[in-house]
Image (spheres, helix red, strand yellow):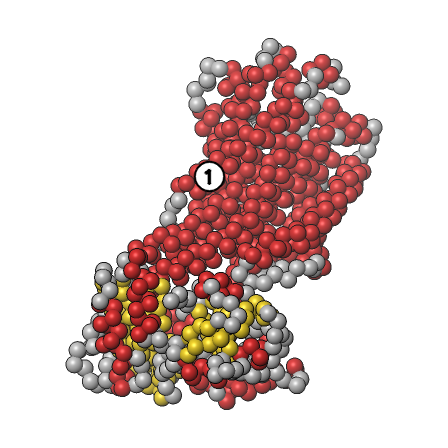
Amino acid sequence: GARQLVSVRAVGPAWPLIGQARIAPDQSVAAALARRGGSFGLLADPLVLARLGLRPGMTARLGTETFIVRGALIAAPDQLASPAIFGAPVLIARAALAGTGLDVPGALVTHQLNALLARAGDGPALRAALRARFAAQGWRIRGPDQAAPGADRFVTLTSRFMALVGLTALLMGGIGVANGVSAWLDGRSATIATLRCLGAPARLVLAMCLIEVGVLAALGIGLGIAAGAAVPLAAGRWLAGVLPLPLARGVYAAPLALAALYGALTAGAFALWPLGRAARIPGAALFRGAVLGGAAAGPRPALGVIAANVAIGAALLALAVGATADRRLALWFCAAALGALVVFRGGSWVLARAVAALPAPRSAWARVGLGNLYRPGAATGRMLVSVGLGLATLAAVALVQGGLQREVLAALPDRAPSFFFIDILPAQVARFTGLVRAVPGMTDLRLVPTLRARIVAVNGVPAAQVHAAPGTGWALRGDRGLTYAASPPPGTRLVAGRWWAADYRGPPLVSLDARLARGWGVGIGGVIRVNVVGRDIDLRIASLRDISWQRLGINFVLVASPGLLSGAPSTDIATLRVPKAGEGALLARVTDALPNVTGIAVREVLAQLGSLLDQIAAALAATGAVTVAAGALVLAGAVAAGQRRRIRQAVLLRTLGATRAQIRAAWITEFGVLGLAAGVLAALVGAGAAWGVLRGLMGVPFVLLPARLAGGILVALAMALGFGYAGTARALRTRPAALLRDE
């Protein structure tokens, strides 16, 4: 009595043509699917067998045919490990399909022909010839590099996201380089001062510093390349269970070489400026305690250094744009990154001015801590960027994930039907209606006739040649559901034109999705040519509808007028609502009486979709966490860059009688305010980015999720306080006497 929604594949004797299917227990496909003892064999996904409690030798029914379970289909060479949202795969012989009663006119059946050529080079010419010979058929003719368009689309979207994460991490790394070089220069100020006083020219000092920084950068790049090659190998098993595509583990030289080039250009672009400034500071100024890092005022680098810095920066920008598959996306990222930096820098300026305008606190430690935010040489801007930029990326990812989950899992079930029933034959409508009406609690029954149609041309232009706007081309490919109705379906909202009369019997008219009409450049009076069971029919557009696909009700791109289409072979689709406790009984009642009718439980589909979103979100969040890790390293560099100033301040304060507790409280105040401000700015920037992604790219309503943003703010506060406390403890361990004696 158990039931499981499956996706049936009826294969011919040559399948899989290339490669081998993995079957447990091990056997040939022909032997597993062959007819023996009057019954055909069946192979099913292990998930199906586990849920139904099936083992080899047991029987299972598909439609009206009973099969012998011969084993589990572990993997097929022509089927990617994609998520089974509408049913896990089941394999039967093509000769067995007729007995199931599932292949009826109007049923959701797709035919696929695979051909292996003697010479691989003949493929492009053959595809072109087939497209020309069968231009009106609307077939998808693909080569091996286009075999899985859905997988290609997922990989493309994922690679775009990872490109954004990588570019963000690159920017964070550049800021970290600048902070690290500043801290490194501060530690060598005495050596540089001595060399300058002994007559060393700025060019010599710059060359020496460049050699040292270059060696350190080379070591860092080498360690990064090694880690980048090792992490996918180590995490491959976990990623294989998370990603909805198979993962080919290995070491790939080209991406690693590209990463090395990114690292070298980033190090040069962000290290050259502070090095050039430090080399030109006079020795006397250094002995007076001038800070070599980027925060202190000082001379600009030489013109040659500035020119080299601009050239390296341009090369880095060109590489970032050129190496990204979507160059427009890379350019938009560069503009957005510049805008984010302006926001954080502007936020630091506003924070410093606001704190300076506050009344002076009574506590000395509070005055010192707040004063550190706006006094000359303060690292407020550098700290805000270091903490906030990575968290802004993570906040955007969290809001996008939360928005999608809320739209799919929270909002939809409240308004979605309980079941979709498809492939109801016209002669079965009366019996189906009687069966479902007898179930207690059943409501909102809706039956709609449906035909399978293919759009052949739009205003005389072949469908393959229509210049469709992004997001509207899908309706021009493959078969579409088509229905006819004398009156507007419930919930119809016309935005142009009007509906035909209930007794209309003239030339065929059609009501079209308004969004698709805009994307195709057609309007009222335009002609959509469709092919129904081999016959081309011209449908003149009478009205345009605004369709809310998110409601998961019965919606059709094309709703035609009755008359000509009423006599075409069709099946019915039904939706209804039933209490959760009665779903199992309803499905059993219908499929026992009408084996060819397929019931799709919307709740199960939404659960599968939610699981898929969770898996993808986990993988993307793990990737996005790279920016937070980079931000933590950059924050550590920013703290280190200001460590010399903090040590001097701690020594002076202790000499003037301040206690360790007072100094620690002052610095914790400073870092706490910085972390809170960085978290708020990161939340604002991340929310803006998430709004752009959800509204602009996905067409999903943006909803502010305060809990997720609050989590980001707390992370920023914790990072700032943690690194600030570590820097404070190190500064307080310095003995005042040694510094006061200028040792």
Residue 321 in percent (x, y) is at: 60, 58
From this view, report whether residue 599 is shown above or below residue 41: above
Compare residues 301 and 236 and report the one nearer the observer: 236
Residue 514 in percent (x, y) is at: 32, 69
Please tell me in which quadrant of the rendered image residue 14 appears: bottom right
Q: Which residue: 37% across, 86% down?
A: 533
Q: Element type at marker 1?
A: helix
Q: Which residue: 21% across, 85% down?
A: 506
Q: Which quarter of the figure is the C terminus placed in?
A: top right
Instruction: From the image, tell me which residue sits under label 1.
Output: 711
| Horizontal arrangement in the rendering, residue 738 relative to residue 314 (left or right) | right
Residue farthest top in this picture: 657
Amino acid type indicated by mark 1: Gly
Residue 227 in percent (x, y) is at: 69, 49
From this view, report whether residue 331 is shown above or below residue 675: below
Residue 547 in percent (x, y) is at: 30, 65
| Horizontal arrangement in the rendering, residue 576 relative to residue 456 (left or right) | left
Compare residues 585 and 734 and report the one nearer the observer: 585
Q: Which quarter of the figure is the N terminus placed in?
A: bottom left
Q: Is residue 322 visible?
A: no
Q: Is residue 107 visible?
A: yes
Numbered label tally: 1
| Horizontal arrangement in the rendering, residue 354 relative to residue 12 (left or right) | left
Q: Which residue: 54% across, 20% down?
A: 665
Q: Which residue: 24% across, 79% down?
A: 561
